[in-house]
Image (cartoon, grey):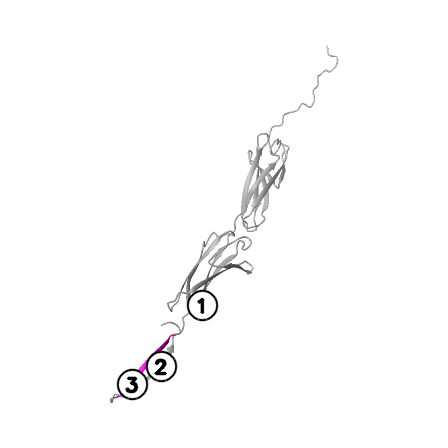
């Protein structure tokens, strides 16, 4: 039997003389709702703002049918704001759609031939992608002396669409002396000597405390001595 079928019980009564009478009762087979048995999202870990997600679901029907499955996607941020991401069993994320710490859900609805439904879902959390220092340079890069003023410049990118903040740290690699922070540093004979290697490290930091860094260095050159004065004594009365 299937839902909406009518099942009848037919009764025949017969007496000793062989006379009969008949009667019956009927019931209608009701529909049983389908069940969403499982929902999963792949990948379930390492999801970023650029991931492609695939949702897989299984459903069953006690009446023996094969339920149809419908998929929808949504994202919920930490403030509870829900954003629709589309329909279908796959979704390609982007920084315009989701941000790190957002929860992405695949919502599945199973529907049987009679229109009865059941729902299920699976969720994943979007992880942060650390920013990357894409370029770094020190100006000037040549002709550096123990009194030079150096400036470090770096750029950084973030796959999540953020604009990272960049900080700088200076180090005399040769002597292991920290020369301070900030984009600029002025050398002196106390902090650097000819042939010393001066390094600038740039660190890019995003709002989720993800960081990336890179470094570059220059070498201090020797400054030739200069004769400032020459005199002969005595300068007069020389015989």
Tell me if residue 11 is in the magenta stretch. Answer: yes
User: Which of the 4 image quarters holds residue 11?
Assistant: bottom left
Residue visible at 34% across and 82% down in the picture? 24
Disc nearer the start of the sequence (1/3): 3
Badge 1 crowding class, 10 Å Cα cut-off, few under 14, some 14 to 19, many 20 or more, is some
Counting from the top left corner in percent of width and height, residue 5 is at 38, 74
Q: Which of the numbered marks, if any, corresponds to residue 25?
A: 2
Q: Which residue is mark 1?
A: 117
Counting from the top left corner in percent of width and height, residue 2 is at 37, 71
Is residue 59 depicted above or below 227 in this figure?
A: below
Residue visible at 60% across and 39% down in the picture? 152
Q: CA distance from mark 1 to mark 3?
A: 44 Å
Q: Main secondary structure of the magenta part?
A: strand
What quarter of the picture does the C terminus occupy?
A: top right
Near-viewer residue (12 or 201): 12
Disc nearer the start of the sequence (1/2): 2
Disc nearer the start of the sequence (3/2): 3
Are the residues flagged by discs 1 and 2 in contact, CB closer than 8 Å? no
Helix, strand or loop at label 1? It is strand
User: Which of the 4 image quarters holds residue 167?
Assistant: top right
Find the magenta span and give its range.
5-15
What quarter of the picture does the N terminus occupy?
A: bottom left
Near-viewer residue (218 or 75): 75
Q: 14 left or right of 166?
A: left
Counting from the top left corner in percent of width and height, residue 158 is at 55, 48
């Amino acid at each position: 039997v299937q839902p909406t079928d009518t099942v009848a019980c037919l009764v025949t009564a017969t007496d000793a003389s062989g006379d009969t009478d008949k009667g019956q009762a009927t019931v209608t087979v009701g529909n049983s709702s389908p069940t969403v048995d499982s929902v999963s999202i792949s990948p379930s870990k390492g999801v970023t703002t650029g991931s492609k997600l695939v949702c897989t679901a299984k459903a069953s029907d006690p009446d023996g049918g094969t339920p149809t499955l419908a998929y929808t996607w949504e994202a919920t941020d930490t403030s509870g704001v829900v954003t629709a991401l589309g329909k279908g069993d796959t979704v390609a994320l982007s920084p315009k759609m989701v941000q790190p710490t957002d929860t992405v859900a695949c919502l599945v609805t199973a529907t049987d031939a009679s229109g009865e439904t059941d729902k299920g879902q699976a969720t994943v959390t979007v992880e942060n992608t650390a920013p990357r220092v894409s370029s770094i340079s020190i100006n000037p890069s040549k002709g550096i002396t123990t009194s030079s003023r150096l400036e470090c410049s770096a750029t950084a990118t973030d796959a999540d669409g953020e604009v990272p903040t960049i900080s700088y740290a200076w180090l005399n690699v040769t002597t292991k002396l920290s020369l301070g922070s900030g984009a600029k540093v002025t050398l002196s004979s106390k902090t650097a000597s000819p042939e010393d290697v001066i390094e600038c490290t740039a660190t890019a930091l995003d709002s989720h405390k993800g960081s990336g860094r890179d470094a570059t260095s220059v070498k201090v050159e020797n400054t030739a001595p200069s004769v400032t004065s020459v005199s002969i004594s005595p300068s007069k009365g020389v015989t």
